[in-house]
């Protein structure tokens, strides 16, 4: 019963673990919010519902990170082994931050804004939550 | 929504400004840097200030908690400059902390509550190793929805840079030219962390290689040097080391007084005639990834309050935490049309001797970026320039009557803009 879950980050990440990328939508204005917001910025009402995104979109901005936070050092990334993150504009309209896969982080100059992508759900290992990723289609 | 145009209840003047040297100081804590800035400020007041007349302090600081293991620093700063038991308030808006502190000081005086306040900022960042500084700065982004997938603070600006490149056709060398310009200015600023031009840095490395008998690098010019991944490694493409402001220790202090008291402290006071502040979503929720709504909002409020237009502003200190940030800033402030800032920079319009000098101090890039102190540090430069006291980096041939500071928190979640006038 998806609609019974509270509109908050815990629910968002629960959905993600179930391989669902979910946005919130104002029942009155139909505006979509991703990350899911509990209050509509347009009408200021809080009658919101969950909506599943198809997960298809295009790259709006990106970067290849050579100097990452300590958690990515644990993943094995460093100056010689960069990783990609980006902002992806979904077909439904909202944009979302995520890890980008299937493109070469060592050749960022060849990556094009506008590249079509589809969502993936990255597991970080036991006890850690899944996070949003996208793969080149 | 707003019922009336924003205006100050009474006028506010800047009558003293000073900063510590910016840099990496292993044996100085926040309070030591603060005392240095405070003494410099007190010394700058033309007719002197009996510091016990200061009624309240506003201290901008991002994260002494994580950088130094010291929370609740405002009363400590008050204590170390002898101002206990006056009210001391810490303001945290990431890298806009002390820009917002200026605004809070202005509001406190304009409201009539106080006549004399100290506005300041301080940050001590170099105790931590780089990866822990990266973690700490990333805490200024959205921890739940941005940092979780591996976004860092430089990475968010790098992403803005790729959007800017795709939208307007700018290249990586356009970013480098912002850094070259700001280092040229910083080379003339004795308080700057890197008071060397990129050319000087390049030449000193060549000299060092010669002395050590190592192969001499064959860089043709600054751009060639900056394109060398060994000399200028990528942090988050397209942002390289020389596109990023450094990790810095520093403090800055400003003395604000009610306008009617200005002449009793100063022969040449600087009036703060406009203040603006705005907020914005996390990067991924913005309609346009190449512009910051908080900055446009803050600028509009400040311009309206001051009754001036972007073209009236003669010089500005803007928040160049990354080279792309300066390009976005000078477009958001209305100095250049969207997509024109990189061309204007290339043409030299923003250089010290250009039509619109930007970051005459060297900017955060070269002067250094002690995050919570940067906003107040910008006002110190405006103070020096407007009073003709900027020494070798004094803007040539301009009688500066109107200037602006633009201070951004994180990727633009906060922006504070102030407009300064010399009468």
Image: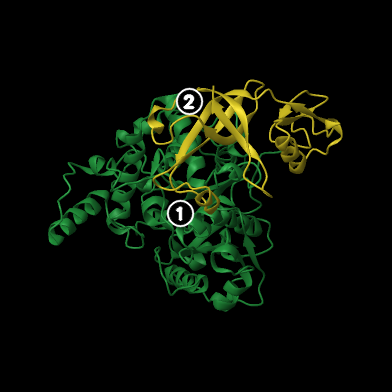
Chain colours: A yellow, B green
Q: Where is residue B39 in the image (x, y as percent from the top left)?
A: 46, 73
Q: Where is residue B348 in the image (x, y as percent from the top left)?
A: 30, 37
Residues at marks 2 and 1 touching, judged by CB atoms closer than 8 Å: no
Chain letter of the residue beneath label 1 in the structure image: B
Q: Depth-wise, is mark 2 or mark 1 nearer the camera?
A: 2
Q: Is mark 1 on a helix, strand or loop?
A: helix
Above/below status of A18 relative to B71: above
Label 2 and label 1 in one chain: no
Above/below status of A24 relative to B259: above
Q: How far apart are marks 2 and 1 (CA)?
A: 34 Å
Q: In which quarter of the image is the N terminus of chain A?
A: top right
Residue at screen point 83% across, 37% down: A5
Label 2, on which residue?
A113
Residue nearest the viewer, comparing B228 with B119: B228
Q: Is residue B47 left or right of residue B410?
A: left
Label 1, on which residue?
B378
Chain letter of the residue beneath label 2 in the structure image: A
- Whether residue B248 is visible here, answered yes or no, is yes
Above/below status of A2 relative to B184: above
Q: Position of residue B390 (x, y in %)?
A: 34, 57
Q: What element carries label 2?
A: loop
Asked which quadrant contains residue B62, the reply is: bottom right
Q: Dot 1: few (<14), some (14–19), or many (≥20) neighbours within 10 Å?
A: many
Residue at screen point 51% across, 39% down: B308
Q: Give me the disc on residue B98.
A: none
């Amino acid at each position: 019963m998806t609609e019974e879950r509270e509109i908050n980050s815990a629910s968002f990440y629960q959905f993600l673990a179930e391989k669902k990328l979910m946005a919130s939508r104002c029942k009155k204005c139909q505006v979509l919010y991703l990350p899911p917001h509990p209050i509509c910025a347009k009408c200021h009402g809080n009658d919101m519902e969950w909506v599943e995104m198809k997960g298809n979109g295009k790259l709006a901005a990106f970067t290849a990170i050579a100097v990452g936070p300590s958690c990515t050092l644990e993943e094995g990334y460093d100056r010689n082994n960069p990783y990609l993150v980006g902002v992806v504009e979904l077909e439904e309209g909202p944009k979302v931050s995520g890890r980008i896969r299937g493109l070469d982080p060592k050749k960022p100059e060849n990556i094009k804004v506008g590249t079509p992508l589809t969502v993936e759900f990255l597991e970080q290992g036991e006890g850690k939550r899944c996070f949003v990723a996208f793969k080149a289609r | 929504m707003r019922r009336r145009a924003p205006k100050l209840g009474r006028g506010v003047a800047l009558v003293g400004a000073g900063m510590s040297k910016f840099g990496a100081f292993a044996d100085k804590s926040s309070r030591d840097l603060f005392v240095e800035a405070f003494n410099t400020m007190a010394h700058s007041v033309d007719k002197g200030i009996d510091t016990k007349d200061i009624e309240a302090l506003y201290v901008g600081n991002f994260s002494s908690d994580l950088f130094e293991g010291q929370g609740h620093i405002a009363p400590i700063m008050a204590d170390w400059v002898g101002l206990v038991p006056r009210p001391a308030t810490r303001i945290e808006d990431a890298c806009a902390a002390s820009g917002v502190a200026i605004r809070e000081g202005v509001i406190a005086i304009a409201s009539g509550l106080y006549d004399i306040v100290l506005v300041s900022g301080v940050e001590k960042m170099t105790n931590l190793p780089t990866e822990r500084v990266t973690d700490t700065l990333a805490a200024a982004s959205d921890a739940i929805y941005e940092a979780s997938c591996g976004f860092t603070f430089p990475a968010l600006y790098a992403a803005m840079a790729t959007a800017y490149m795709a939208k307007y056709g700018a290249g990586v060398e356009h970013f480098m030219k912002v850094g070259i310009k700001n280092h040229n200015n910083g080379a003339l600023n004795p308080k700057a962390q890197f008071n060397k031009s990129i050319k000087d840095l390049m030449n000193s490395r060549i000299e060092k290689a010669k002395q050590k008998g190592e192969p001499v690098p064959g860089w043709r010019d600054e751009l060639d040097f900056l394109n060398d991944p060994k000399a200028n490694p990528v942090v988050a493409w397209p942002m390289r080391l020389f596109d990023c402001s450094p990790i810095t220790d520093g403090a800055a202090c400003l003395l604000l007084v009610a306008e009617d008291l200005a002449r009793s402290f100063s022969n040449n006071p600087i009036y703060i005639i406009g203040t603006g502040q705005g907020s914005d979503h996390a990067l991924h929720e913005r309609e346009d990834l190449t512009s910051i709504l908080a900055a446009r909002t803050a600028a509009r409020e400040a311009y309206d309050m001051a009754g001036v237009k972007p073209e009236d502003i003669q010089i500005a200190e803007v928040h160049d935490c990354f080279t792309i940030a300066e390009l976005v800033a000078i477009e958001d402030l209305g100095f250049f049309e969207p997509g024109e800032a990189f061309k204007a920079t290339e043409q030299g319009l923003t250089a010290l001797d250009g039509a619109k000098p930007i970051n005459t101090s060297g900017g955060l890039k070269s002067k250094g970026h002690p995050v919570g102190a940067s906003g107040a540090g910008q006002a110190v430069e405006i103070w020096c320039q407007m009073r003709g006291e900027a020494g070798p980096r004094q803007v040539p041939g301009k009688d500066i009557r109107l200037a602006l500071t633009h201070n951004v928190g994180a990727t633009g979640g906060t922006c504070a803009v102030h407009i300064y006038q010399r009468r």
